[in-house]
Image (cartoon, rainbow, N blue to C red):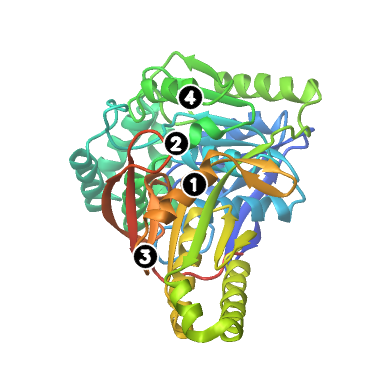
Amino acid sequence: MEAPEVRYAKSGDVNIAYSVVGEGPFDLVFVVGWVISTLEYAWEGPPAEFFRRLASFSRLILLDKRGTGLSDRVTGIPDLETRMDDVRAVMDAIGSKRAAVMGVSEGGPMTALFAATYPERTAAAILYGTGATYLRSDDYPWASTREEYLRFIEERERRWGEQEYMQELLEYFAPSIAHDETVRRWWPRYVRTSASPGAAAARMRMNMEMDVRQVLLTIGVPTLVLHFAGEKVFDVHGARYMAERIPGAELVELPGEDHAWFVKPEPVAREVERFLRGIWDRGEWDVVETDRVLATILFTDIVGSTAKAAELGDRGWRELLGRHHALVRRHLVRFRGRELDTAGDGFFASFDGPARAIRCASTIRESVRELGLEVRAGLHTGECELMAGKVGGIAVHIGARVAAEAQPGEVLVSSTVKDLVAGSGIRFRERGVSTLKGLPGEWRLYAVEGTEEASPPP
């Protein structure tokens, strides 16, 4: 099989390169890790056999992440929700309504977030050779420290392209084929043509801040966690951690020490095929039973509204409130938010991406000042119950409590929100630990300090 035709899907103003291989009964989206390409030159090396095997039982959808491979080069590194937009854009371009999504290595956290946010588009999630976060913590002790990871980044950018370093990377990612002369000739060019040194380092810096631990419990689609037990990039304990927290997840540990997905195509593809064919054969592929979804909740309210109403009188206040509501609704549409309720002078809305929600809240805060008003806003990302077009559940209550802690003119977010916007350019100031009325435990909150200018979502 030759390299398949490369096409492009428009995601916002960026062209995402993709290929489709195979004619299986169901769709499988392959989300590669780090900066590695899945198109063209990948087919001149070991990945070709892996892709052929996956395409033997599925319609395999391959794409290069924006900024890498054959996709458009972009300024900065896209955050997780932008990458989710790119996956949906490719699925839409080929008419794929629902697919299994296989995320490998760095593609795993995005796949977990995609499955939790868009269960109606995700028939199953496969997490291969990945973890929930990159940095060590009390409940995740097997990851790197921040200092260790920063050293990895510095070395990778400084030595990118050196023949000796390329071979060191090959031995790190794929030790069992690292001494194959054909692979050794192919690998350096494959890596260099996938991304530049700066792009490789920038993506690692984004990874360092990425954390989807709080997302795992909200995944409601069938999930397979697949891991080679002896690999060095992601410790197998991370795979066990995810499988224990994703409801109903299946964990398969394979013998071996390779991290690279293309080294041993047969055992990996065999497990993927078994898992996906089971879902298909049981007639569950297109059955969307979930009544829960991951969403970002936004609450806003006007500061000092009672005093302002007394100053303006009933008619003047109604007119000003109408202008406020029109402005807020305009920005909700712009940032793809969904208005759920208005209570007096406040808004309750939901978003499918936390960075969009933060940018919307920040834009509202600045815009209403032109009306002589000040608002406070609070955001939380969590699992929400779907009820007759509305959302409810504990995540909504947390969002409301976070908003209640916000100071005038402040956009305040929970730590979950902060953890999910790595790469967004949004800056935070830690506000310390708070107790939220009616909720157990302590909550770490962050005030939004600033956001980089962003285009409206696609």
Left-right relation of 447 to 21: left
CA distance for labels 4 and 3: 33 Å
Tags 2 and 3 touching, CB below 8 Å: no
First in sequence: mark 1 vs mark 2: 2
Label 3 sits on residue = 410
Q: Secondary structure under badge 2?
A: helix
Name the amino acid, label 2. Answer: Gln
Residue closer to the observer: 183 or 111: 111
Viewer-nearest of labels 4 and 3?
A: 3
Name the quadrant of the N terminus.
Answer: top right
Tags 4 and 1 touching, CB below 8 Å: no
Residue closer to the observer: 70 or 290: 290
CA distance for labels 4 and 2: 9 Å
List x then y, in percent, for residue 448: 35, 61
Q: Which mark is residue 245?
A: 4
Label 2 sits on residue = 214
Viewer-nearest of labels 4 and 1?
A: 1
CA distance for labels 2 and 3: 24 Å
Tags 3 and 1 touching, CB below 8 Å: no
Q: Secondary structure under badge 1?
A: strand
Label 1 sits on residue = 381
CA distance for labels 1 and 2: 9 Å
Name the amino acid, label 1. Answer: Thr
First in sequence: mark 4 vs mark 3: 4
Name the amino acid, label 3. Answer: Glu
Q: Is residue 412 visible?
A: yes
Label 1 neighbourhood size at 10 Å, few (<14), some (14-19), many (20+)?
many
First in sequence: mark 3 vs mark 1: 1
